[in-house]
Amino acid sequence: PMSSPSSKLLLGGLIGINDTWLRDKGAVTTACSACVQNGTYSINRTTYPSVGDVPSSLMYGILVVFRSGYWCCQLAADIIMKTMYYRVSGDNATGFSEWKQI
């Protein structure tokens, strides 16, 4: 039956549902550099004031992460100031460039 976990996994694989899809990953609670899986993350520095390595003016926003192997790109959208930032890592997401405004 399709109710078993292995059947659901097989069906998802057949229609292309896997870890490359962008899904909601929840809130950034520690640092943006810890968010390295494909997906979207919410940024709320009022709820999580200790969140590190975010563009300094960004209080509320969305972090979008694209990862392929050792390469990782992060986009941060500031929903108050209506600005966008990006940074990249080519070192298995262990070291990121500085944030740059788009």
Image (tube, rainbow, N blue to C red):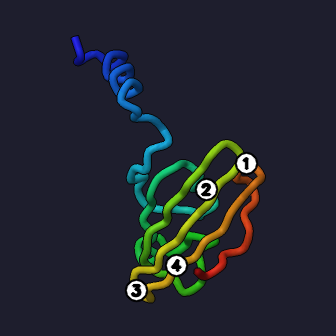
Q: Amino acid at mark 1?
A: Asn
Q: Position of residue 74 (x, y in %)?
A: 58, 63
Q: Does label 1 or label 3 sit earlier along the sequence?
A: 3
Task: Judge from the rendering whether residue 10 lies leftward or rightward of residue 31; answer left or right.
Answer: left
Task: Judge from the rendering whether residue 44 lies leftward or rightward of residue 34; answer left or right.
Answer: left
Q: Which mark is residue 34?
A: 2
Secondary structure, mark 3, is loop
Secondary structure, mark 2, is helix
Q: Amino acid at mark 3?
A: Ile
The answer to which of 93 and 13 lies nearer the viewer is 13
Q: CA distance from mark 2 to mark 3?
A: 23 Å
Q: Nearer the viewer, mark 4 or mark 1?
A: 4
Disc 1 crowd rating (10 Å Cα; few below 14, some 14-19, many 20+) is some
Q: Does label 1 or label 2 sit earlier along the sequence?
A: 2
The answer to which of 47 and 99 lies nearer the viewer is 99
Which residue appears at 49% of the width and 84% of the height? 83
Give the residue number, with chain letter if any, for mark 4.
84
Q: Amino acid at mark 2?
A: Ala
Q: Nearer the viewer, mark 2 or mark 4?
A: 4
Which residue appears at 58% of the width and 80% of the height? 102
Number of residue marks: 4
Q: Does label 2 or label 3 sit earlier along the sequence?
A: 2
Q: CA distance from mark 2 to mark 4?
A: 19 Å
Give the residue number, with chain letter if any, for mark 1.
92
Q: CA distance from mark 1 to mark 3?
A: 31 Å
Q: Does label 4 or label 1 sit earlier along the sequence?
A: 4
The answer to which of 16 and 36 lies nearer the viewer is 16
Secondary structure, mark 1, is loop
Which residue appears at 55% of the width and 48% of the height? 37
Q: Position of residue 73 (x, y in %)?
A: 62, 60
Task: Judge from the rendering whether residue 9 lies leftward or rightward of residue 71; answer left or right.
Answer: left
